[in-house]
Amino acid sequence: TVITPPPFSALPPRSPSSIVAIERFIHATRDSGYKSTGSAIAELVDNAIQASASDISIAITNDERQGISVEVWDNGSGMTPTTLQEALRFGGSTRFDDRGGLGRFGMGLPNSSVSQARRVEVITWTNKQSAYFSYLDVDEIASGKTKVIPRPVPTALPIGAVKKLGPSGTIVRWVRCDRSEERRVGKECRSRW
C-alpha cells in the first residue's frame, strides 16, 4: 500500500519557522568549537594575520565592576562597516573557504568570542578619520532584544590607537568573560606566544 501525503493546500496553516532557534542557538554555540581560551584567542590572532597585521597586542584585565576582559589589538587592514557587520555574523565571511589561515567558514570571530565572553565589542578603521563600532551581546540575543547584527556606528578611536597601531587596524574586546580565569588566560597566552 502506498500512502500519499495530502496536498499542501490541505495542510493547516503554520507560522513560519526560522532555521535556527536563535535564543537557544546562542547558548549552544558558546559550548562548541573552542576547548580553551588560548585557542579562542588564537582565532583572533589568525584573523589579524590574515588582515596583514604586523603588530598584534593581547591585553587581559580584571576589573572589579566588569570582571575579566580580553583585548586583541592589531594594525591590519581594518574593516569597512559592511565587512564588520559580516564578520560578526555566524557564517559571515569575506574569506569563505580561504585556506590561508585557521578559519574558513566565517565562524571564528563570533564563535571564539562568545565561547569565552558574554559580549564582544569591535572597533575597526581603514583610515584614522573613520572608525566604526559594533558588538554581539549574548544576553541581548538570548532575550530576543537583538535579532540582527547591530549596524556599525562611527566612533572615536581609543587614545593612542593610531600612534600604537597606525592608520588602520582592529580592536576586539571580550567583555564579561565568564568562561575563563585571569591566571589561566595569562598562562595560556604566554605558552602560545
Image (spheres, rainbow, N blue to C red):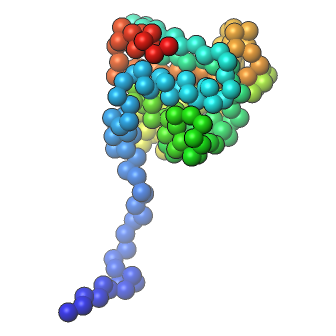
Name the outermost residue toward the bottom.
1
Name the outermost residue toward the left.
1
Work out whether 53 lies above or below 12.
Answer: above
Quarter that holds the N terminus? bottom left
In the image, is 171 to the left or to the right of 8? right
> Residue 13 appears in which quarter of the rendering?
bottom left
In the image, is 79 to the left or to the right of 146? right
The answer to whether any part of residue 58 appears in the image is: yes
Work out whether 172 lies above or below 186.
Answer: below
Residue at position x 34%, y 44% in the image? 24
The answer to whether any part of residue 155 appears in the image is: no
Seen from the viewer's position, the closer of residues 104 and 134 is: 104
Residue 157, how many percent across, how many down? 69, 17
Work out whether 16 lies above or below 85.
Answer: below
Residue 119, how many percent across, how many down? 46, 27
Seen from the viewer's position, the closer of residues 148 and 61 is: 61
Residue at position x 68%, y 32% in the image? 79
Residue at position x 70%, y 14% in the image? 165
Seen from the viewer's position, the closer of residues 94 and 158 is: 94
Residue 189, how many percent across, how many down? 45, 13
Residue at position x 29%, y 88% in the image? 4
Residue 61, how many percent across, how many down? 46, 8
